[in-house]
Image (cartoon, helix red, strand yellow):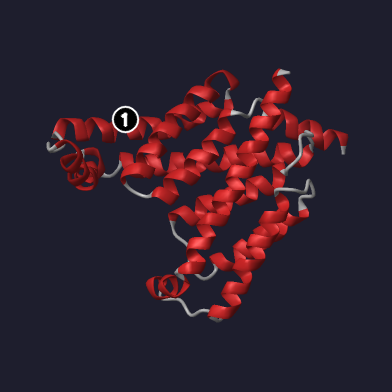
Amino acid sequence: MRRRNSLNVQRLLFILSVVFIIIFHFEKLLNIKTYYLYFSTTPFSYQVSRLLLYGLFLTLGISMFSEKRIFLFLGLVLSSILNLQFNYGADVFIFNLTLFLAFIGNSSKDDFLKSCGYLLMLSHLTVIYIYNGVNKLTDSIWLNGKVIEFYLTPKIGFLQGVELDVGIARFISLSVVVLQFSILLIWFKKCRKLIAILFILKHSFIAFFLHPFFGVVCVLTHFHVYFYKGNAFKDTLKGLEKS
């Protein structure tokens, strides 16, 4: 019963992730000319880009009802072509979430590709957050809390009628740096859920105050981490030995 409930939750999370990826790209479809102007890129043509997006919606839509990974990999190819034209922080996480979903698939069966998918996801998160943590640790503007003050003071003032204290801003800045490096603990089963929850809280905060798309895609990614109970290295090696 517990395993069945776990599989149901993972399937629901898979569907939510695919739906969000579609919504993310649908926003691009609605504002495609603005994106090209903002990124100063030369489009193939607006019509071709729209066709690529329609193809992406179709393949991802089918993937929610099919256990065949081919549709997710086709969506991944279309996403890669679109990323050649324009992408920003959220696009990187959207692409990596799409890549991860293509490997784990829409199936309850554990296999070699699914293990590879989790290994890719954990490795990607480790590299991204460690790199980001080092940058923040060597950035005096981040450490003195100026960045937090700049982004949050207007919103805190609007919500509560008070300005953000400098000491609190610095504490938040340092806490974020510590959290970035704690990503290494996701490789240990006993720590994984706690670390995932901390990152979910962090990115929920970002989604509410700063960048909704970026925050939500990161929250979804860390929910996948939260519900993962395997050992990415061992499971992948076992799959290689069997093959």
Q: Is residue 230 visible?
A: no
* Vertical comparison of 149 with 87: above or below: above
* Vertical comparison of 29 with 136: above or below: below
Q: Position of residue 86 (x, y in %)?
A: 48, 67
Name the residue at 51% across, 54% down.
92
Name the residue at 63% across, 61% down.
57
Q: Position of residue 191 (x, y in %)?
A: 52, 21
Q: Position of residue 46 (x, y in %)?
A: 53, 79
Secondary element at tag 1: helix
**Residue 11, picture quadrant:** top right
**Residue 198, picture quadrant:** top left
Looking at the picture, which amino acid does disc 1 mark?
Ser
Within 10 angstroms of label 1, few (less than 14), some, or many (20 or more) residues?
few
| Count of numbered circles on the image | 1
Q: Is residue 76 visible?
A: yes
* Vertical comparison of 126 with 212: above or below: above
Q: Which residue is disc 1 drawn over? A: 175
* Vertical comparison of 53 with 197: above or below: below
Please state, as top left, top right, bottom left or bottom right, where the N terminus lies in the image: top right
Please state, as top left, top right, bottom left or bottom right, where the C terminus lies in the image: top right
Q: Position of residue 6 (x, y in %)?
A: 67, 26
Q: Residue furthest right?
A: 243
Name the residue at 63% across, 37% down.
12
Q: Looking at this view, is 65 or 195 the one in front?
A: 65
**Residue 192, picture quadrant:** top right
